[in-house]
Image (spheres, grey):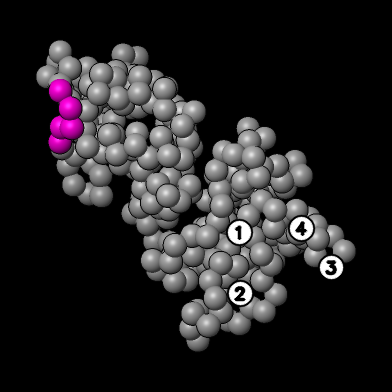
Amino acid sequence: MPSTATLGVGLAALAALGCADANAPSGFEDSSTSTTSGSSVTSATTSGATDTGVAQTAACAEYLACLDEIAPDEVAAAQAEIGPSGSCWQAAAVAANCDAECALFFSQRCEGGSSSDTGEPPLKCSIEGLLPGTPSPIDAGDGVGQLPIEIGDVLERNCGCHYIDANDLGRTVPAYKGALPLATWQDFHSPFLGTLIYLRVEQRAVIQLSMPPVFFCDSLAFGSLSAADHALLEAWLAADAPDGASWP
């Protein structure tokens, strides 16, 4: 199961979203209505309801099953909120929002979601933007020797040419013959022309702002990078590109 996503890393990221109500469970916003992909969220049950009559939804059961595979250390905390007897199911309004968050994070972390999951079109130089439906080869996760999940998301959004065979890109994409391997943490720490690849990426993408190429990719705040992606990539590279187990 791909370990990417673009906006969060499990319950820690859910907590960053904040809560609109002091009684809402940690990590999920309280709301009387919530939508996923433009349609109203429903509470399809997967197990017995709590005392309030609200049951765990299918989306949250699916996300828990995914966490068990990709981040087992997060399961216990997630169970307390979105498990069958979790705090999400104490009120119908909170349950609807929890359901929406589960669906969002399942899409981001378990299906290799792209910016299109949030209604935004994928960036032109993202994997999805260059060749829709292409699975991500990026090895990202919280483990030793893996790229941090957040960095994997940045690479998916901006560096698609490094992950797609040039023969599959079509005539509308300029030929790019110098693509460095950027799929694994080990790739970034491999030598290239007398320096380590992550240092070369830092020079081109963070300092010179010449990658991703502005002449073809979306022109954003920093060359072709958004302000958020530039700041995240800059911080990671300045820390000597640590792996997922070492990246805070």
* Number of residues whose C-alpha sits closer than 10 Å to that of mark 3, classed few (under 14), some (14–19) or many (20 or more): few
The residue under label 2 is which amino acid type? Answer: Phe
Q: Secondary structure at mark 1?
A: loop
Quarter of the image with the C terminus is top right
Q: Secondary structure at mark 3?
A: loop
Q: Secondary structure at mark 2?
A: loop
The residue carrying mark 2 is 215
Q: Which mark is residue 193?
A: 3
The residue under label 4 is which amino acid type? Answer: Ser
The residue carrying mark 1 is 183
Where residue 37 appears, as percent x and y from the top left, is 25, 49
Cα gap from disc 3 to disc 2, whole angstroms: 25 Å
Answer yes or no: do the residues labelled 3 and 4 have beta carbons within 8 Å? no
Mark 2 or mark 3, which is nearer the start of the sequence?
A: 3
Q: Which residues are magenta?
A: 44-48
Mark 4 or mark 2, which is nearer the start of the sequence?
A: 4
The residue under label 3 is which amino acid type? Answer: Leu
Residue under the image location 26 percent in, 38 percent down:
59
Q: Comparing marks 2 and 1, which lies closer to the viewer?
A: 1
Q: Comparing marks 2 and 4, which lies closer to the viewer?
A: 4
Where residue 132 appears, as percent x and y from the top left, is 40, 68
Mark 3 or mark 1, which is nearer the start of the sequence?
A: 1
Where residue 46 appears, as percent x and y from the top left, is 18, 32
Q: Which mark is residue 190?
A: 4
| Residue situated in front as seen by the camera: 220 or 174 | 174
Answer yes or no: do the residues labelled 3 and 2 have beta carbons within 8 Å? no
